Structure formats: structure tokens, C-alpha cells
Image (cartoon, grey):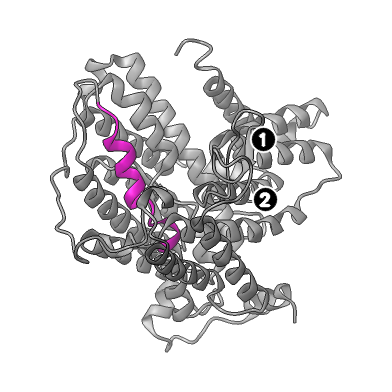
Amino acid sequence: MTLEDGAQQRQQTPPAPDGRPWLDRFFLIGERGSTVGREVRGGLTTFMAMAYIIVLNPVILSGVPDANGDFLSPAQLTTMTALAAGLVTIMMGVVGRAPIACAAALGVMAVVAYQAAPVMSWPEVMGLVVWQGVTIVLMVVTGVRTAVMNALPHNLKLAIGVGIGLFVSLIGLANAGFVSGGDGSSLLQLGASGDGGSLTGWPVLVFVCGLVLAGVLLVRGAPGAIFYGIVGATVLAVVVHQVAGLGAEDWGGRAPELSGGPVAVPDFGLLFQVDMFGAWTTAGPTTAGVILFTLVLAGFFDAVGTILAIGAKAGIARADGSMPRVNQILATDGTGAVVGGLTSSSATLVFVESTAGVSEGARTGLSSVVTGLLFLAAIVFAPVFSIVPSQAASVAMVMVGALMMAQVRGIDWSDMTVAVPAFLTIVMMPFAYDIATGIGVGIIAYTVLRSAQGRFGEVGWLMWVISAVFVFHFSMHALGL
């Protein structure tokens, strides 16, 4: 029996009787062809693939002064990052009932740190993040966000999933030190910068061993292949670190060792440190408005692309690519931005690393509840979770990229009005290092090429509106905004 046959058989299997456990009924575990064990394993895998955000978010945000020269506390940011991720991910599991985890969004984080903070105070920055969430929720309530998702043609939805897979793989390869920015003769190169285009060092070997282990287990059909790849790489990293006498800098700043005790005292000092209206006077309405527009756009389309990709990968999307309970999923995503602002940890949105858990069998919101509980546990046990080095977590990201490439076969490559936009969507995500950019370029290309054939009715007015928004977004700097 093939995987497709198994998926079709599960879809044709009638729902379990009403006497089934309440957990099964609530999360639709049996109906989606999953088990509690798979959901727990998927939740663990997702957490391990994205736990780096607990370290990365504080490093980025605490390293940038605001307009007053003030810095955020790394210890407080660590607590708030884990708290926001835990609460919103559990909410996604219970309300959205989808295998989607949430954490501080990297795209939004960059806007917050490098565009907003230099022109206003940190409480004012987080006030704009709250407004971002409010705006997104209003878009869900009015049906705008759902209409945008439904307006995207099916072939572009498939291309978005493939592009996200390549994007995630590139991040994983870079975090592992397997590829890096070129030393001058090329844009990218094999190995870390300064290594002359070759692989050197124990950490890269740890990544390769973890990748081989996950790959071998995967092709042999072993349950939990990616999860055990991460665990195996982590164990090897701990041994190598002690035997070879490596330092934290060899691992990219995060050594696989337990420093101090396993428990850390959480610091909730940043909770509710928000100024909702100060940004509009400090930076001015025009500047604050442009920053808010950028925050909404970055969070909006990153989330749309991620949700569509996860739905397709998990097999829970409908035939037309739409998602069940999409309004609840989108509303939770918007609420996550509000929670992120109130905790000063930046917008907490859907995380593309959720595909790691899906690849391990996660199909329901139960896996998200597991991931969320682990984030809450990380508030206290942060030193334990920090043992997993980025080289081990990167194993999941690269394997996920390989699995998500399968969606490319569903794209109609014989129609150039589909092939060109799909190609641009796929390649621009890793090339521009941004999910929203890939979606925007693909939408513009599809709208223009389909209309050039006179097929205006197939495009729809909403696609023209979305294209215009992206054209404005891409040209803002040229316009001096």
C-alpha cells in the first residue's frame, strides 16, 4: 500500500463512535488518522525545532537600544518569549485545533528591532505590535483575511509550501554552519564564513551525523525519525563538546552543556510594559503608520503562507487548499501579536518550524498543546532546553524542506501563467530570505500574466488589490517612506 492509498483510506474511514475518549472527540485525533502518541511526539519535535527562539529573540531585541538609548533585559526577554509562545501555542491547539505552534516571528522581530526601536521607546514599539494584532483580528472578523487566503489560486498555494520548505532548509543549513555567506567570490558557499568553502569543525560533523541518522530512519519507515535525529545529534554534541574541549563560540554561541543548575528563576518585569499611543506622537503619525503597515504585511502573509503549507503537509486541507477552522486559526494568530506586544517579546505568530512536528505525524491541536506546555516549562527549565544546539535542531529543518518538496508535483508546469509565478514564489523565499516577499512576487506575476492573456475573470479583483499592496510595499523605500 502506498502513502497515497493510506491517506485515502483514512479519509474514507467513518468517524469513531460517540463512545470514544473525549480527547479524541475534541481534537479529531482518530478522524485525522493520528494517535495520541504521534501527537505527543510531533509536539516534542516541533518544540525542539523552534526552541532556539527562546535564545535568539532575547539576543536580537536586547542588543538594540531604543530612541532613548534604553535596552531590554535579556533575562526578562527570555521569560517573556517562552511565556508568550506557550500561551499562544496552547490557544492555537485548543481554539484552532491545528498542529501549528506560535512564537516570536523572525520577520516581525527585524522590523521591531531595526525599524521601530530607533525612532521610539520600547513601550511605544510594543504598543504598535499590539495594534498590529488588533488590526489582524479585525481583518479576520470582517472576513478580509479569509477572503485573501481563498483568493490565492491553488497552484500558488502549492508553490508557497515548496518555497517555505526551501526557506526552512536554508535557515537550517546556515544555522548548522553547513552553508554561509560567501567570502567575496560568491553569494553563498559551503561551510562557515572564513573556511574557504569547505566543511570544518566538530559542530558541522554533529549536524551531518544527525541528518544521516534521521534520513536512514525515515527511509526505513521508523516512527519519530526526525525527532530521534535531533536527540541523537544532541547526545553526540554533548559528548564531542566535553571530549574535544570546545567553547560556546564553536557552536555559534550556544554550547551543548548545562551551565549552573537545571532551574532558572523567571523574571516577569516586562509584562504589560506597553504604551499604546505614544508612538504616534514620538515618531509622528506618518512614520508610525508606515511601521504599522509593514508589521501587518509581514505578519499577515508569513502566517498565510505557513498555515497553507502546514495544512497541505498535514493532509487536513480541503481539495481546494482551504483549511478547516481557518477563522479560529487566523484569529488566534492575530491574538498572538497582541500577546507578544503585551509581553514585550514581539509579535507571537505561527511558526514555520511546525512542519517538523507535522512530518513526525502531528495532525491535530493536541500536538500544539504539548509544544505550548513545553514552552511554559522552559520558563523555569530554560537551562535544560538550551542544551540542544542549533546544529541538532537544524536536522529537523533540513529534513522538513526535503519532505515539503513533494508538493511541487501538483503544480501545473504546462501553463506558463502558472509555472512562472510558481517558480518565482518558490525561489524568492530563500533568495530574498523572506516568506512574504516570495508570496508577493508570485501574486504580482500571476496577476499580470493571467491578465495579459485576457483571463481577467480568473484573476479576480482581490488579486489586483493584493498586487497593488505589494507593489506599494516593495517601492516604499524608493518613495522615501
* Left or right: where 131 falls relative to 197: left
Instruction: Name the amino acid, label 2.
Output: Leu
Q: Which residues are magenta?
A: 47-65
Indicate yes or no whether the magenta region holds residue 63. yes
Give the prevailing secondary structure in the magenta stretch: helix
Q: Which mark is residue 158?
A: 2
Tell me: residue 150, above or below residue 83: above
* Three-letter residue code for mark 1: Gly
Real-space CA distance between mark 2 and mark 1, rounded to the nearest whole angstrom? 12 Å
Q: Which mark is residue 442?
A: 1
- Please indicate whether residue 132 sits to the left or right of residue 265 in the image: right
Residue at the image point whose x is 73% and y is 77% from the top: 5
Residue at 61% of width from left, 76% of height from top?
217
* Residue 248 spot, x, y in % from top left: 36, 51
Question: Tag 1's secondary structure?
Answer: helix
Vertical side of 475 occupied by 136: above or below = below
